[in-house]
Image (cartoon, rainbow, N blue to C red):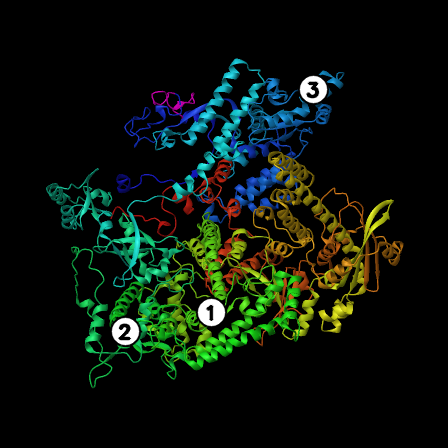
Amino acid sequence: MADARDEAASDVLDSIRFTFYTSEEVRKISVKKITKPDLFDAKKAPVLDGLYDPALGPLNTIDSCKTCGQLSVRCPGHYGHIDFGKPLYHPLLFTNLKGLLQVTCFHCRRFRLNRERVNKYATQLELIIKGLPIEAKNLDQVSPNKLSSLKNKKRKFPAEYVDSKNLRQQKWTSLQHSEALLVLSKFLREKRKKCENCKKRNPTITSPVFGWLNKDTHVADISANFIIEPDLDLPSTEVDEPKRLLYQEAQDKDDPFPEDGASLIDKELAVPAKEQRNTKRNLKELPAGFTKQLNSSGRKHLLPSEVEFILEALWENESSFCRLIFDIQEGGLNAPSERGHTMFLLKALLVSPSKFRPPAGAGDGKVLEHPQNVLLSKVQEANITLCDLIAKSPDDPIIVRKWMDLQQTVNVLFDSSKALGKTDRETSGVRQLLEKKSGILRQKMMGKRVNHACRTVISPDPYLAVNEIGIPPNFALRLTYPVRVTPWNVDELRNAVINGADIHPGATHFKDKDRMYKLQVSRNNRMAIARKLPTSRVSAQTGKGPESDFEGKIVNVHLRNGDVVLVNRQPTLHKPSMMAHIVRVLPELKTFRMHYANCSTYNADFDGDEMNVHLPQDEVSRAEAFSIVDANKQYIVPTSGDPIRGLIQDHIISAVLLTKKDTFLTRDEYNQLLYSCCVPSVAPSSQVSKLGQKVSILCSSNEIQPVPPAILKPKPLWTGKQVITSILNHITRGRKPFTVEKDGKIPKEYFGNDLTEHKLLILNNEFVHGMIDKAQFGKHGLVHTVHEFYGADTAGILLSMFSRLFTIFLQIHGFTCGVDDLLIRKRSDLRRKDILETSEKESKQVHLQFTNNNSIGSKDLQKEIEKVIRTNVESETTRLDRMMSSKLNAITSEANNALFPNGLVKKFPANCLSLMTVTGAKGGLVNMTQISSLLGQQELEGKRVPRMVSGKTLPCFPPWDISSRAGGFISDRFLTGLRPQEYYFHCMAGRDGLVDTAIKTSRSGYLQRCLVKNLECLKVSYDYTVRDSDGSIVQFKYGEDGVDVMKTSFLAEFDVLAANKSILLDRPSHQDLSKSNAFISELPEALKEKATAFIHNPSKKGLLHKIEKKELLKLLKLKYFSSLADPGEPVGVVAAQSVGEPSTQMTLNTFHLAGRGEMNVTLGIPRLQEILMSAKDDIRTPVMTCPLLHQTEKEDAEDLAATLRKITVADIVENMEVFTVPLYIHEQQVSTMYRLKMKLHHPDLLNMKLFHSDDYRDKFGITSDTYEQTLKGSFVNVLEDTISKHLELVSKISDISVVSRKGESGIDEGDNADESENKSGQGEDNDDEGDGSDDADDIAEDQGADAEKRKRQICDEMEYEDDSEKVSSPMAEEHDEEATSGLEDDQAEADEDDYVIGGKPLTSEADNEDYIEGDKPLSFEADMETSENPSEFEVPEAETKNDASETKSKTRRKGRGKIKRVIGVKYHKLKFELLIVFKKEPHILLAEVAQRTAKKVLVKNVKNIERCTVIERKKPTDPYALQTAGVNFSAFWNLDEHLDLNGILSNDIHAMRNTYGVEAARGTIVNEVKTVFGAYGIHVNNRHLSLIADFMTFPGWYRPMNRLGMERFCTSPFGKMTFETATKFIIQAALHGEVDNLEAPSASVSLGQPMKMGTGCFELLQNLLL
């Protein structure tokens, strides 16, 4: 390793091309042909020609290689190979081969498409390869005769580039990649039974098991082909291969391979055999040629040898197009003609070297074989068996069996998941070695183990500098750095060598020329080596680098004070999670010591956290660590551009106590504080001190100048503010002073009559007024201002000085909390009690309002609550929770305001607990209130404590209790204790938080991984554009203004810039930045407008910053050009981290109230996954919002909303009754007749509820004719379908109960049942493609009756959802694996009790009547007499197309015979009756079925819109707005007279893109991600979001950032492989001959090369002649 590190690389990889080895190449690579399956002989020696043949490399460390002669350490290993007796299908390319054969003609050996279409696809590919994807896309409209002219078209470039090399070096772009894959997928989808060239029909190709093909030739096809060409001979290799091999009848009873696919294939082959014999018997008189062809009909094996013959001819006939397909980037220029078709077949198999298949010891003396050896042995055994059989009898029909057996073993070797037996599936094939987190790519190539690192627990140390880290001596003695001996450091290195490895600072190794010596324990030996060091001499020679100027002596010295190390804490979620710290070796320690200021960057605490330390091993790494990665330079977090480092907890308390108005210090105290904070942090690295010595070296540069005292008489006294002034003067010495004005964290009311102390003012370094609290370490605070104007190092020194100062002062002053800090004055406590006693009264009022009652008794009120909630459990519970929470939160706030801050016995700042919470040191007001006031409302997943089925929250409360306490409102406090019920509720909320955190971690981690892998290639170029690895421009200016996020904080703070203009103008390095910039020369217009508004707004200008416009623009120009992003900045990774890291702070599932109580919107990580990862077409909660015109009043707004609301039959039904006639003659059969009677609301009453205005009632109101049309049409048809499904469910449940009874009786039928279910499932699936309900039914049957019920309900809900009318996305098929819609899940849960026998129905009026009628003992004869004559009823009409579309019944099963059960309908005067007849079906609860149907059938609706509400105004000047659940823009467009259509918004990004274009989709992505983070108070800089949105919409549509998006658009095979499904992407890359130019970071890391990002994006040229 040392040799490789010291010498410069002689060669660097430029690109990697992926291809498959041919059989000839395999044999050339191999050094040995493996002919035996054995590993060792009886003497435990490797068997010659076996899998451990010595030629493949030594197994033991002492043996030498028989091929290269090296020992095992030096031997790289050598390949062997196995020659197969017959060619085999390549298992990894089997699916691709099958698809290719399905578009290939077996007769003419060409593609089955006609020549014009093949030429069109070829031309499209050629145009894409030339860089003309737009022309290729438009080729579908071009006539065939123009193809030749387009084929020769070249891309037009500017004149200066025509003769350059740029045309030849043009990169393969993501647009070309996606378009080429699209063309190929279209071509392979165009499957024809009949060849369009030779007009002949081709056999059907099937795959009974993975890895083997059959072809099925029908007699009719042979007849048709014979008519076309009577002299046609048998196709392909049927002449060469024996017929017994091609056609094998399934007569063999003794199946030697029960687990492989042979028996399955034989079953498929058996049926055509009979057909063929019958055909031979019946058609003896036909011509001989025809009879010969008929003998080849039926289902046969499609052997690899025959496929090889077909592919060879195809490559010969379609050579140009085949080369295009399988060498897609180079257009077939690099692909030899023989390589293409041979990749699909295996004739020889490479055997990996022995060192990669070592045997493992089991611990008890036994040796465990490597899994690869087991699989290779099986392959070799099967191969030997096949070869022996072929040698004995070439015509033996068993050959195919053995051939298949060999194919199956090779399949398992490549991919064990394709094995037919369970034991084989548990082994590890080649694919399993590559994939997942533990695979070679991610564990060995992307993630590497490192040397020169250490890890232990961290401990705090406030006396260290903020960028220092304390290292234990144990690590310092073992971590070394290689130092080259020079005349300038020879004395220091001599002392290190003399000290040796056990004395610090010493050395462990010495290198002379090309040998490394470990320093001996003997001091005399070390002295001898030390004397050799000064012999190094400088010999300058022209044309040689500095490495050759010395003899090359290197000493590995110990880690010393002043060295730089990289410190990292996992999880490394963002850039500041790995920073460089300066080493200070601390004696007698066992842990790392770290300053408190680093806790927020690492997200670390000191409760046992461990961290990693890495020691850089060369000067370039050290230079980057000092100048780029230094902890002081990570003061700003890239997520938002705000400060992340600062002092915390005790330091803030001490700062407030020191800077209070009444803090005075004597001369001794003042001088002691100044001295303690100004001791230098660490001695220079050249001054080496011994362990245990405390050295304080003061020089004039470190002396601090005191200020005059604030009070002279009776004795000199200094204020705490003057200490801060002295420190600020010290750190800014030699530079202009600064000014800062910043509001403090402490609210104004805590200062009483003092109007100045709540705001900090430092004027020209003088601390005028205010206090240093948490705000001064935050955004635009004191430290942030110093960082901005004096640099990161000065800010780091200031934090270190403050840390020592506040630590010493707190030791002098003291600080502790006691019980007296918690006590409340008696009057305030009584006031609190009075306020909390109103909670029960307010709770009752809320419940009365919830049930729309004025006054009612408690018991009656409980019944009313139950009745309302039972109608719709989910939405009504949510509405009640919202109403209760808002009222109780108001009571909680009132109680807290009465106590804080004036209700405490001890006032601020004497109250230590209040001092902690108010200043931001630790905790917050919520901690004070929970201790002294009350705990308040407890919430679980954003809701109140849920009720059980009984209506109780806990068993001790009565059902449907209206008290606030029963809903989780805790009026108790920790100070006086909790009651058991409150304690239980509080524990429930705590447990909910723990579970949520555990689940959230994995989800947010995967989200961040997806973002990083997709965005990793984006970087800022030298022209300030953001480009991908293929050179595609994603943004023309990073963040639309080119500014680095970490430099944006003060860009718009004009008052601060004006107050400190002298500092800015004093900087010499930024004077001519704008002149030297060739790409950006002017300020952004938005920044100019803000500056102009600031100048013309006198209220914003104070005494501190009087400035003219010209001077301000000059300052802004300086600031702007110094804030531009640096070229090479990896902005993609930073953007991914800036979204991924804050997502860990969000709760998992949150439904946010949008507008009013009934509208929920998905938030949190699920919503981020919808937007960024999956880019789903059908989101869970689509919402559309549009403001109304300003003059619109609220009543008009509500009327408009009512026009868009959905009205169902359930809304118009007043009550429902069911009468039963058990004996009724219908069509000469005894039947049961049900009479369903429905009484309807009057349309005028319904319109009165919906609309305020008569105009809207007349225009949009519902009429009686609408009632009649809907009930007679849609309702009857849907009711028929619902009854049929219900009866199917009842029959399935009865079947399940029969099976369960059999199981209870002790009969084990598991296997048979599984087989029968599989068969039935396959049959249903074939009959019913695309339905999906059959598969769900089969799964549910396996899971039992309850699961079946839930599955059927979900399918039932989906049956009538408006899926058929939604706009489908072109990538919709790619998201099948994503989670189903949450709406469907919620509806399924809400309807879970639909089928409970005897359960309460859902609509109260209808249910009561139904059950009252059902309880009466009816007289059937009397009922018949009183009922009307059935002949008076109308016969229902057949279902029309309109009805079918309205009821959304397009998903009904095909081919199902529809039984008409409704024999009569009647509508008269708002009464509707149905006569329904059941012949031999079981009894059903028709009332429940009818109610469920009534909720689904729509009387009035707007397509895709579930409901519409009015959003209240936020300000009196704002207009009202309409918000809909569901998206249908045309519904708003039709109301353009009332709506401001320019303000229309939606959270459905696909809908916005399809309707308004890709730029609207881009803006929607930014707004939606902002909304998600905004709900949690998280700020992410807009530059990150705009970059992500531009990247996702860059192709012109909305691309997901998951595996599917990478597959289509990523041009780096390594980037795709190291993400997911490595084997799939390796195969795709090799199949199409893709090239990786190593521009992507993943490719560079995998190959151990520096990434082309940051300092690696450029190279330096050295003029060697100077």
Residue 235 on the magenta segment:
no
Q: Nearer the viewer, residue 1317 or 1120?
A: 1317
Which residue is at the far bottom? 714
Local packing at callout 1 (Cα closer than 10 Å; few below 14, some 14-19, many 20+) is many
Question: Could you tell me if residue 1536 is visible in this image?
Answer: no
Q: Quickly name the residue at label 3.
A: 231
Residue 1312 lies, with reference to residue 825, above or below; the image says: above
First along the sequence among labels 3 and 2: 3
First along the sequence among labels 3 and 1: 3
Q: Quadrant of residue 1523?
A: bottom right
What residue sits 67% from the left and 32% below the top? 193
What x and y, as percent, mark residue 447? 38, 44
Q: Whole-Å distance between the Cαs marked 3 and 2? A: 106 Å
Q: Which residues are magenta?
A: 30-48
> Which quadrant does the N terminus fall into?
top left
Q: Quickly name the residue at label 2.
A: 724
Looking at the rendered structure, the kind of residue marked 3 is Asp
- Badge nearest the viewer, 2 or 1: 1
| Label ID, residue 935 | 1
Residue contact at pointers 3 and 1, CB within 8 angstroms: no
Residue contact at pointers 2 and 1, CB within 8 angstroms: no
Residue 1224 lies, with reference to residue 812, above or below; the image says: above
Looking at the rendered structure, the kind of residue marked 2 is Ile
| Label ID, residue 858 | none
Q: Nearer the viewer, residue 1536 or 454?
A: 454
- Badge nearest the viewer, 3 or 2: 2
Residue 31 on the magenta segment:
yes
Local packing at callout 3 (Cα closer than 10 Å; few below 14, some 14-19, many 20+) is few
What x and y, as percent, mark residue 518? 19, 40
Q: Whole-Å distance between the Cαs marked 3 and 1? A: 94 Å
- Kind of element beneath mark 2: helix
